[in-house]
Image (cartoon, rainbow, N blue to C red):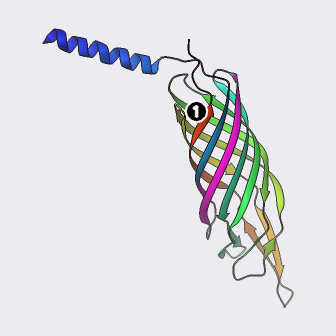
Amino acid sequence: MKKISLSILMLASAVFAKAQQEHVFKPFKVDVSLGYAIPGGEGAKGGVLFVVEPKYAVIPNVSVGLRWELAVMARGTSDATGSTAKVDAKAAGSYLLTGDYYFTQTTVRPFAGAGLGIYSLAAASVDNSSASAGASNKFGEMVRAGVELAHFRVGLEYNIVPKTTMETVNSSGVKTSNDMKNGYMGIKLGFVIGGGKIKK
């Protein structure tokens, strides 16, 4: 019985070690993900996002890429009095140069990364108000963390985008400013095309 138990333990250890051994991965891959966008600010409402990101591993643990993302959400606004309102749901596109660091070279690959680039914001208007903002481009950044398991990818990202200020003038000539928050968090689930293990 002891020999059987020892054999099972040795077999399990060998399987675990094989699963955790380091691999060599193909350098080029494309991440494709769907997710949920959570904008900041009172009165905001979340929406959906879609992303495509081709990448190349410049060294085994570091990949650089170009992220294209489309997020549809209703951003929130606030004025000088603290009153909040909801901006109508619009799409925000982004084009970022990204970099990821992978902490392991095993089947399970936790990572952390960041990105810089342009966020393209659609024109928007505030509910029950004449306040509006035209389409604009803003320079922003992104930080993220997650894990890849074989060809599946789960991640959490925070997009830091400068706010937009909208001014309106009522019939009495009084100006009112509304700050529209453009930053948002993304929760993503996707898959990886390419980038598989190279057979030795």
Going by the numbered disc 1, the residue's amino acid type is Phe
Q: Is residue 164 left or right of residue 28?
A: right
Q: Quadrant of residue 128?
A: bottom right
Q: Residue furthest left?
A: 1
> How far across and how far down the image is residue 121, in percent?
78, 60
Instruction: Name the residue located 15 percent from the left edge and 11 percent from the top edge.
Output: 2
Q: Is residue 148 left or right of residue 100?
A: left
Q: Residues within 10 Å of mark 1 (few under 14, many from 20)?
A: some
Instruction: Name the residue located 31 percent from the left edge and 18 percent from the top edge.
Output: 12
Q: Is residue 199 left or right of residue 10?
A: right
Instruction: Name the residue located 81 percent from the left edge and 54 percent from the top edge.
Output: 138
Q: Main secondary structure of the magenta part?
A: strand
Q: Residue furthest bottom?
A: 172
Q: Residue furthest right?
A: 173
> How far across and how far down the image is residue 132, in percent?
79, 74
Q: Nearer the viewer, residue 19 or 200?
A: 200
Q: Which residues are magenta?
A: 36-58
Locate the N terminus by quadrant: top left
As helix, strand or loop, the secondary structure at mark 1 comes to: strand
Locate the C terminus by quadrant: top right
Compared to residue 107, the image places residue 95 above or below, namely below
Compared to residue 124, the image places residue 60 above or below, namely above
| Residue named by callout 1 | 111
> How far across and how far down the image is residue 97, in percent?
76, 39
Magenta span has 106?
no
